[in-house]
Image: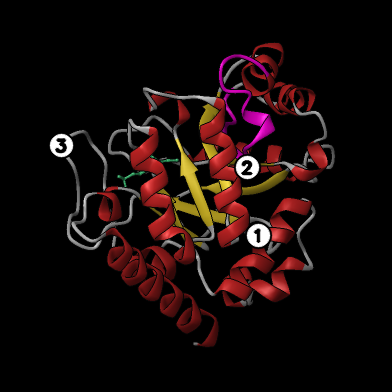
């Protein structure tokens, strides 16, 4: 049962090298907190990352909301990732035919494959979307994908069959060296201990926003929903003291993980 296993032990089961690295990083850093920095200005993002860097295992970006994007920005992000020891995930949610996602991943303004360790991807197009991403990376052996099997927002159209078929795609022998984990909301989706469950929709002080987002507490995300890594966005970024907020989420999430594997 992967929910009872430590991240160290699970690193031995990872087929994707980046997932292995991430399990080890989480264990060493004692953090299973991913922060979503959904902010429009480069300066504000870098300022935030300098404050939260010590507390996170993954920094999640939406590069297409940045208004003043430039290449120096991604160089600075990569330098901060090395300094504070976290991975960078671009939450692009690729969802097109292989040829298109290959260009979206490797080319265009953002050249995501050059700086993001991890990306998110919808399973909707099937195997071709993963082949396209492999094709868009110069060397995919140091890259990983998180496949969306479920979503956090109320009214989303994903059903049980879609989730099950997504897991089949993820476990397929030709993809499993590239799939680092699964984005989902319940503890029964991920059974393979080598895959990492990423769960967004986590906040301490709110249960929803005005645009259908639904939140659970850090404890519920880890212990009831089976998250290995929880994604926190506005719970931290809207806080008056982002460093203290990041530390608080990190402590709550890590204690929930420790109590999950010990109980
Ligand atoms: O199902 C999902 C999948 C993702 S990746 N629900 C989500 O909310 N996300 C992302 O997590 C979303 O794009 C956003 O960047 C973050 C949640 O942000 P928050 O401010 O609501 O915590």
Residue at left offset 57%, top offset 72%: 29
Mark 1: is the Cβ under 8 angstroms from ligand 1?
A: no
Image location of residue 55, percent across then percent down: 45, 66
What label sits on residue 210 in the rendered view?
3
**2 and 3 marks in contact (CB < 8 Å):** no
Which of disc 2 and disc 1 is earlier in sequence? 1
Asked if labels 2 and 1 touch by Cβ distance under 8 angstroms, the answer is: yes
Q: Secondary structure at mark 3?
A: loop
Residue 59, horizontal then vertical, whole percent: 49, 49
Q: Is residue 200 visible?
A: no
How many dots with numbers? 3
SS assignment at label 2: strand
Q: Position of residue 204 (x, y in %)?
A: 23, 63
Q: Which mark is residue 22?
A: 1
Q: Quadrant of residue 245?
A: bottom left
Q: Quadrant of the N terminus?
A: bottom right
Mark 1: few/some/many CA within 10 Å (<14, 14-19, 20+):
many
Residue 141 place in picture, x, y as percent = 82, 42
Label 3, label 1: how many angstroms apart (C-alpha)?
A: 33 Å
Q: First in sequence, mark 3 or 1: give its number.
A: 1
Q: Which mark is residue 118?
A: 2
Q: Residues within 10 Å of mark 2 (few under 14, many from 20)?
A: many
Residue 59, labelled with which disc?
none
Which range is magenta? 107-124
Question: Is disc 3 in contact with disc 1, using a CB cutoff of under 8 Å?
Answer: no
Distance CA(mark 2)–CA(mark 3): 29 Å
């Amino acid at each position: 049962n992967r929910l009872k296993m430590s991240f160290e032990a699970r690193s031995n089961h990872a087929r994707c090298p980046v997932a292995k690295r991430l399990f080890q990083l989480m264990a060493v850093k004692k953090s299973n907190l991913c922060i979503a920095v959904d902010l429009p200005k480069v300066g504000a993002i870098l300022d935030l990352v300098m404050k939260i860097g010590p507390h996170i295992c993954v920094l999640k970006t939406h590069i297409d909301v940045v208004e003043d994007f430039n290449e120096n920005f991604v160089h600075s992000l990569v330098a901060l990732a090395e300094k504070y020891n976290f991975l960078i995930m671009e939450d692009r949610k690729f969802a097109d035919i292989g040829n298109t996602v290959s260009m979206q991943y490797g080319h265009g303004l953002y050249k995501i494959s050059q700086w993001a360790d991890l990306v998110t991807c919808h399973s909707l197009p099937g195997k071709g979307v993963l082949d396209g991403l492999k094709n868009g990376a110069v060397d995919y052996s140091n890259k990983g994908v998180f496949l969306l099997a479920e979503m956090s927002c109320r009214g989303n159209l994903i059903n049980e069959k879609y989730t099950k078929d997504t897991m089949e795609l993820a476990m397929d022998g030709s993809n499993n060296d590239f799939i680092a984990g699964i984005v989902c909301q319940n503890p029964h989706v991920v059974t393979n201990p080598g895959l990492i469950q990423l769960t967004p929709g986590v906040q301490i002080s709110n249960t929803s926003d005005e645009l259908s987002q639904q939140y659970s507490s850090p404890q519920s995300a880890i212990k009831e929903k089976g998250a290995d890594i929880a994604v926190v966005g506005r719970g931290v970024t809207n806080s008056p003291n982002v460093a203290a907020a990041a530390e608080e989420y990190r402590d709550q999430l890590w204690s929930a993980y420790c109590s999950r594997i010990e109980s």
